[in-house]
């Protein structure tokens, strides 16, 4: 019997297009002898469209959007929809939410899937939402004793009531340079680096456009190193990968805006540094009670500190993204990685029952 796998992709998020690319790559990598693949496409407007079982691999991303033959469903009918409409299937064995950012990676979809009582790939409700809020994530890392940059945070109403006080707090506690970020986002959206008071004022206004809560961090000059973590109660780590801006100077803008970066895998770090990263990655994973996978992102500062920046609970997952690439270098290729993630989803579900 084939495993009935539902792929949730697209999504009401800035990373919609990335999700399409990922869905295409995942459908091509899955063995159709083993898996019956049922795609559900979430439009940018948030409509859920159910496609028929995929019998061939996808060649064109547009094929994945089911403009012609898709049938609209409401999310809470997800489980029943197959049973009602297709005699041959009862329901899904496992769901793979290939979604990034708010409304996908933040515990909302995960909560719905919990209610449906179907195994799903990746992190649960608590770890997804805790990792999406950078303040909560850093508070939990602090409690675990992980080294990180100094930070402070505000909600919009506190800032509006006394903006001067907010700026003075940042200047006295963190100084410049500092980074201002919306608390609940990814992909560097709404993030600014500040070197002075004028920058800080602009950065607050910018970040508050995206979220009612923002975080401000001490800026560091550092290498950016990332480690893949895979597992449930006994997580394993991949080799480390480094993000190197091609222009040769440290600029976070170039990484995302111009796409001017190179991934160096394995990262050129010492054995001691790698041991430290692995230990910190597992502690970070456990401190948020993660399951399935995370990509743990670190800074190694010019003065030799290894500090954790964040974990991403559904990191970029195209075959050219850091997470699959660090696993490939560790000996786990893309199809095997996907199968292991599916297996971990089923394992976690069974342990909960
Ligand atoms: P996102 O979740 O959007 O990826 P990050 O916190 O990872 O947000 O920030 C995006 C990028 O901004 C980082 O990869 C890094 O290049 C830069 N950056 C973020 N915080 C700092 C910091 N405190 N010091 C130096 N650079 C930072
Ligand atoms: Mg992130
Ligand atoms: Mg990041």
Image (cartoon, helix red, strand yellow):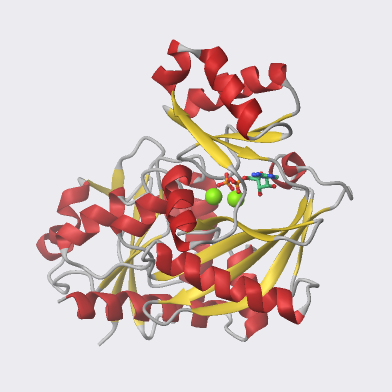
Above or below for 171 versus 327: above
Please tell me which residue lies in front, 345 or 217: 217
Left or right of 157 in this view: 199: right
Percent of width and height locating residue 259: 74, 47
Horizontal side, residue 16 vs residue 221: left or right:
left
In front here: 106 or 64?
A: 106
| Residue 260 screen position, x and y as percent | 79, 48
Query: Can the viewer see residue 152 in this picture?
Result: yes
Q: Does residue 339 sit above or below 134 in this rendering?
A: below
Spot the residue most to the right: 248
Which residue occupies 56% across, 69% down?
280
Left or right placement of residue 89 versus residue 179 in this view: left
Q: Quadrant of residue 216?
A: top right
Q: Hey, which quadrant is residue 2 in on the image?
A: bottom left
Quarter placement of the N terminus: bottom left
Q: Nearer the viewer, residue 234 or 279?
A: 279
Picture quarter with the C terminus: bottom left
Q: Ligand 1 sits in which quadrant?
A: top right
**Which is more toward the observer, 182 or 17?**
182
Q: Residue at x 40, y 46 (%)?
A: 11
Which residue is at 50% across, 57% downward?
A: 312
Q: Residue at x 61, y 69 (%)?
A: 227
Residue 74 is situated, as x and y percent measured from the top left of the image, at 20, 45
Residue 135 picture location, percent across and down: 46, 43
Identify whether 282 is placed above or below 218: below
Residue 100 in sight in this render: no
């Amino acid at each position: 019997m084939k495993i009935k796998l539902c792929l949730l992709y697209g999504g009401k998020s800035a990373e919609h297009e990335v999700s399409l690319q990922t869905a295409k790559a995942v459908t091509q990598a899955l063995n159709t002898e083993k898996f019956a693949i049922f795609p559900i496409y979430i439009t940018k407007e948030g409509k859920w469209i159910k496609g028929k079982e995929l019998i061939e691999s996808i060649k064109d991303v547009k094929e994945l959007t089911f403009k012609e033959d898709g049938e609209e469903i409401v999310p809470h009918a997800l489980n029943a929809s197959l049973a009602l409409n297709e005699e041959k299937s009862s329901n899904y064995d496992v769901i793979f939410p290939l979604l990034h950012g708010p409304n996908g990676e933040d515990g909302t979809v995960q909560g719905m899937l919990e209610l449906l009582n179907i195994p799903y790939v990746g992190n649960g409700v608590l770890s997804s939402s805790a990792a999406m809020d950078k303040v909560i994530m850093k508070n939990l890392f602090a409690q675990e004793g992980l080294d990180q940059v100094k930070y402070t945070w505000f909600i919009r109403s506190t800032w509006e009531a006394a903006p001067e006080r907010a700026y003075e707090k940042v200047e006295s506690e963190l100084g410049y340079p500092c980074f201002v970020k919306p608390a609940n986002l990814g992909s560097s959206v709404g993030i600014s680096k500040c070197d002075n008071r004028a920058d800080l004022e602009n950065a607050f206004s910018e970040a508050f456009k995206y979220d009612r809560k923002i975080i401000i961090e001490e800026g560091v000059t550092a290498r950016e190193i990332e480690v893949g973590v895979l597992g449930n109660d006994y997580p394993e780590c991949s080799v480390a990968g480094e993000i190197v801006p091609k222009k040769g100077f440290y600029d976070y803008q170039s990484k995302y805006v111009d796409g001017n970066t190179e991934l160096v895998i394995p990262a050129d770090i010492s054995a001691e540094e790698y041991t430290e990263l692995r230990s910190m990655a597992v502690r970070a994973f456990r401190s948020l009670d993660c399951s399935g996978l995370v990509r743990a992102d670190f800074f190694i500062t010019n003065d030799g500190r290894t500090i954790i920046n964040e974990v991403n609970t559904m990191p970029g997952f195209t075959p050219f993204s850091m997470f699959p690439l660090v696993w490939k270098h560790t000996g786990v290729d893309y199809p095997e990685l996907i199968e292991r993630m599916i297996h971990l989803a089923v394992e976690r579900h069974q342990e909960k029952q």
